[in-house]
């Protein structure tokens, strides 16, 4: 096995310290759990990078409730999210995704900020956060801004983050009359990248779809929100037939590719299946039954 | 730099390119921590970091400063680990043995927090530990047997 090379490691204890390092050092790369990054440094000869380790910065870690929102610090691990009652109650799709992502060992180290900023089209936390209209807080030394998560992703492994910027936290609005769910398909149950993953958020008024948000991952250069289908089915009465129509309409919207994990054709078919499974589960969680 | 290794404070030279796995094997001679894939897939290098299972191949050695690292060597006298070890041996859960230290640590962590796990919970606890002899059935039986042996409390 090749030795690890190509980086320095700096471990700031404060956020201000980390932002200063991001602004002043050449070629920086934030690191938290390292579950995506360390294997990368084994595989490719990288240009000398300054790894900025965020794991000592207390204010970036943890889950709080503020102004009817759940705020998750970027270095919060999947295990921390999984054991949080607020998330289990109000953001069940995210809870679902953190329970199937990686393995116990990976969930104990991997962080939500890392999962998002790595910007894999297959990132399992992305579809749940997208259907919950999550916003992310981005900062450099001088400026701090909030943007919708949807605007963070630019392409496979690409985000809009500038070289001196850090993602500090993720904000999820609490909507107590709603429910959500996440489903994925991988080669086996645990510990593999998703071939396709999907999340659905829904609000139900009797049998009517009062609000619906859908997202599918690993079927396009970035995780997708399927807004065209959402708009089309707003206010419609839910039924088995409508569920099938939504699945079909979603699979028409995706732009998958062939790769080692699956063919484009298979992904398109599975988009239909998985979004239906997620929506069915979300609907069930609102107390509704689809007949 | 200092960290706690199997109950004792130890000092080490923190080299960023050195993983916790290589530090434990090469500097401290703890070869119970196995080097399998070296990229966080196989779980053979599992150790407990502040009590939680992690892949030591994905941790840079400076990142363990001030933390508590436990390998099976540090649990050799632990009652729960003794039961687990006996259950592994008596249920034929060890074939080549390469995955065993990692399997034991993942199972230990499960039973420490959950004395009466379901088969599904056992499977989830060891999903990050690959057994290339594919002896999973006997491993799962051994963990469930250990749970029975230690009893509900």
Image (cartoon, rainbow, N blue to C red):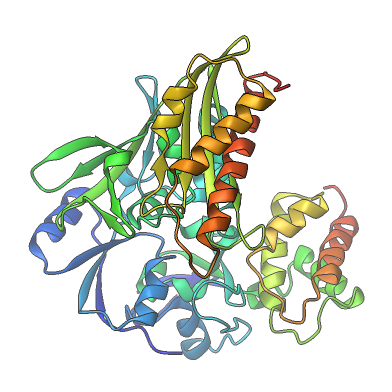
Residue A137 position, x and y percent, is 25, 39
Q: In which quarter of the image is the N terminus of chain B?
A: bottom left
Q: In this view, does A152 lie to the left or right of A90?
A: left
Snapshot quadrant of residue B145: bottom right
Q: Give the x, y percent position of residue B122.
A: 76, 57
Q: Between residues A202 and B90, which one lies in front from this camera angle?
A: A202
Q: Which of the 4 image quarters holds residue B76?
A: bottom right
Q: Is residue A81 above or below residue A57?
A: above
Asked if B128 appears above or below A177 in the picture, the reply is: below
- Position of residue A247 relative to residue A24, above or below, is above
In the depicted view, which residue is nearer to us: B37 or A121?
A121
Query: Which residue shows up at 64% across the image and 59% down it?
Result: A190
Please indicate, yes or no, whether residue B124 appears anywhere in the rendered image: yes
Horizontal and vertical percent for residue B99? 69, 78
**Residue sitting at 56 percent across and 38 percent down?**
A248
Choose top left, top right, bottom left or bottom right for residue B86: bottom right
Note whether A168 is above or below A122 in the view shown.
above
Q: Looking at the image, which is closer to me, A69 or B112?
A: A69
Q: In this view, does A2 lie to the left or right of A178?
A: left
**Total numbered badges shown on the rendered structure:** 0
Q: Is residue A84 visible?
A: no
Q: Is residue B149 left or right of residue A104?
A: right
Residue A236's x, y, as percent?
A: 54, 16
Nearer the observer, B26 or A290: A290
Residue at 45% across, 72% down = B58
């Amino acid at each position: 096995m090749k030795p690890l090379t190509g980086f320095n490691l700096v471990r700031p204890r404060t956020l201000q310290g980390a932002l200063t390092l991001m602004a002043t050092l050449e070629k920086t790369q934030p690191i938290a759990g390292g579950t995506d990054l360390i294997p990368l440094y084994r595989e490719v000869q990288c240009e000398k990078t300054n790894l900025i380790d965020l794991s000592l910065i207390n204010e970036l870690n943890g889950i709080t409730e503020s102004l009817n929102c759940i705020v998750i610090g970027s270095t919060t691990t999947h295990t921390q999210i999984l054991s949080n009652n607020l998330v289990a109650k109000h953001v069940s799709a995210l809870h679902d995704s953190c329970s199937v992502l990686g393995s116990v060992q990976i969930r104990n180290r991997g962080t939500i900020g890392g999962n998002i900023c790595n910007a894999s089209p297959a990132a399992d936390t992305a579809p749940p956060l997208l259907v919950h209209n999550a916003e992310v807080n981005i900062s450099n030394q001088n400026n701090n801004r909030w943007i919708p998560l949807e605007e963070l992703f630019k392409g496979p492994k690409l985000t809009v983050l500038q070289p001196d910027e850090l993602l500090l936290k993720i904000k999820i609005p609490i909507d107590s009359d709603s429910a959500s769910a996440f489903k994925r398909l991988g080669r086996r149950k645990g510990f593999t990248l998703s071939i396709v993953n999907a999340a659905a958020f829904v609000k139900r008024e009797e049998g009517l779809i009062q609000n619906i948000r859908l997202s599918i991952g690993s079927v396009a250069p970035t995780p997708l929100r399927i807004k065209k289908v959402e708009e089309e089915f707003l206010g419609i009465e839910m039924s088995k037939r409508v569920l099938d129509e939504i699945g079909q309409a979603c699979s028409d919207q995706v732009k998958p590719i062939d790769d080692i994990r699956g063919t484009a054709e298979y992904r398109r078919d599975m988009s239909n299946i998985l979004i239906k499974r997620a929506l069915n589960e979300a609907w069930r969680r609102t107390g509704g039954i689809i007949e | 730099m200092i960290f706690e290794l199997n109950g004792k404070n130890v000092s080490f030279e923190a080299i960023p390119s050195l993983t916790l796995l290589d530090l434990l094997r090469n500097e401290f001679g703890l070869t119970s921590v196995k080097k399998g894939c070296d990229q966080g897939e196989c779980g053979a290098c599992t150790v407990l970091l502040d009590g939680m299972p992690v892949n030591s191949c994905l941790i840079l050695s400076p990142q363990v400063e001030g933390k508590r690292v436990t390998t099976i060597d540090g649990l050799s006298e632990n009652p729960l680990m003794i039961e687990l070890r006996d259950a592994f041996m008596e249920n034929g859960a060890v074939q080549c043995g390469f995955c065993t230290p990692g399997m034991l640590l993942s199972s230990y962590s499960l039973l420490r927090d959950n004395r009466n796990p379901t088969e599904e919970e056992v499977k989830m606890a060891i999903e990050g530990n690959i057994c290339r002899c594919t002896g999973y059935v006997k491993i799962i039986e051994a963990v469930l047997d250990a749970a029975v042996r230690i009893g509900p409390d």
